[in-house]
Image: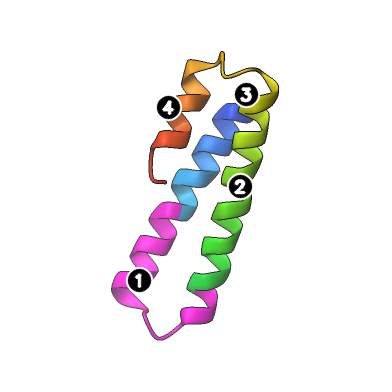
Amino acid sequence: MSNKDSYARRHRYLDDKITKLEKTNSYNRELITNLKKKKLRLKEQMVSEVRSTGWRDKEMRNALAIGS
């Protein structure tokens, strides 16, 4: 499995987890905030990798577009 698949999968997982917590556990804002920060760092890694490849990888560009 390549990094792009791993990044996209982890990004989706965090997005799903954040959404679920926001719907059911809104009193735990610290946890939600920490997950959002982790998701942002992951997206920054994804963007960095895409830039280093010169935006040639269509799958990675698509992964960045989902769940922003």
Magenta segment includes 20: yes
- Residue receiving disc 3: 1
Q: Residues within 10 Å of mark 1 (few under 14, many from 20)?
A: some
Residue type beneath disc 3 = Met
Q: Determine which of the numbered discs, if any, sits on residue 22 in the image.
A: 1
- Taking the image as shown, residue 60 lies to the left or right of residue 49, namely left
Residue at 42% from the left image edge and 46% from the top image edge: 68
Residue reaching furthest right?
Answer: 52
- Residue receiving disc 2: 42
Q: CA distance from mark 3 to mark 4?
A: 17 Å
Residue type beneath disc 4 = Asn
Q: Determine which of the numbered discs, if any, sits on residue 62 in the image.
A: 4
Q: CA distance from mark 4 to mark 2?
A: 15 Å
User: Which of disc 3 and disc 2 is earlier in sequence?
Assistant: 3
- The answer to whether residue 65 is above or below residue 51 is below
Q: Residues within 10 Å of mark 2 (few under 14, many from 20)?
A: some
Which stretch is magenta?
15-31
Q: CA distance from mark 2 to mark 3?
A: 17 Å
Residue type beneath disc 1 = Glu
Q: Are marks 1 and 2 in contact (CB under 8 Å)?
A: no
Q: Nearer the viewer, mark 2 or mark 3?
A: 2
User: Which of disc 2 and disc 1 is earlier in sequence?
Assistant: 1
Q: SS of the residue at dot 4?
A: helix
Residue at 49% from the left image edge and 54% from the top image edge: 14
User: Which of disc 2 and disc 4 is earlier in sequence?
Assistant: 2
